[in-house]
Image (cartoon, helix red, strand yellow):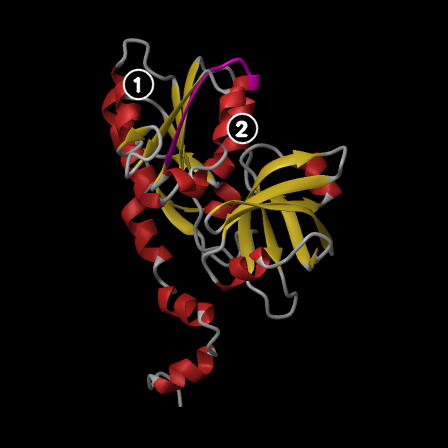
Amino acid sequence: MNPILFKEQLSQDVYRMRVRAPLIAEERRPGQFIILQLDTEYGERIPLTIADADPAEGSITIIFQAVGKSTKQLAQMGVGEKIANLVGPLGRPTHIENFGRVVCVGGGIGAAPLYPIAQAMKKAGNELTVIIGARTKELVILEDEMRAIADEVIICTDDGSAGRKGLVTAPLKELCEQEAKPDLAVAIGPPIMMKFCAETTRPFAVPTVVSLNTIMIDGTGMCGGCRVTVGGQTKFVCVDGPEFDGHQVDFDQMMARLGSYREQERIAATGCNLHDEAVKKGLKE
């Protein structure tokens, strides 16, 4: 059991929690994630990136968006309540070194897993530019935290209510067009956003790392639910990733797989019984 030590709402449906997990706090590295389960018997297993850690307190920080049944249940929990099952750190850590100029691009909730990577890149001596994108000003998260570590922060919103109006790919392209273009780009966010960030950097030969958040169950490479195609080869996000060369990822296949259980997710979110719903539709007797 892992007690919740702190909770706050960052924006609409987005929450930050500190959870007691001393062993994970000691071992985690930027880019790694945990899998949590609210009910050990029937609960869904949710992969979430470790947004920060405090080994002295013995805590990790998770930031999540309440979009499905389980994340909505998690959002309703408060300080002192306990998460039934939490395992990690999982996945391969981000490769951190002094590359020179690094641009980190976060779309929506993607700013959360981006933060520890940006933090580590700056600590390694890189010149750091951070681009944060969101639909509106109210949905921009971690702006203050990013400004505290980055040399430059660029905010983009779809409606122009904060920063520049438009997509994150516009300032990313401008940076790539400079004589001193980035030596590395890191993009984390919705799959479509990561796809077009990779396509933006491709003509300029800027190495681009993306962090994939796919359907995942066990987190050990056994179930195969998180498989993706990278460079024509099958990879498993939980053990081979979550980070990959963005220029090699088959994003279209990944996005198609992400929609595999959309109907079941919709039913679960409404509180219906999956079996009863299937019977109504004639899928089961």
Mark identifier at residue 175 = 1
Residue 145: x percent and y percent? Answer: 53, 28
As helix, strand or loop, the secondary structure at mark 2 comes to helix
Q: Nearer the viewer, residue 50 or 78?
A: 78
Residue 102: x percent and y percent? Answer: 42, 19
Position of residue 248 in the picture relative to residue 22 (left or right): left
Residue appearing at x 30%, y 43% in the figure: 192
Three-letter residue code for mark 1: Leu
Residue 3: x percent and y percent? Answer: 73, 52
Q: Is residue 96 visible?
A: no
Res. 100 image quadrant: top left
Mark identifier at residue 145 = 2
Image: 249 above or below 123: below
- Which class describes the residues within 10 Å of circle 1: few (<14), some (14-19), or many (20+)? some
In terms of secondary structure, what is the magenta stretch mainly? strand
* Earlier sequence position, callout 2 versus callout 1: 2
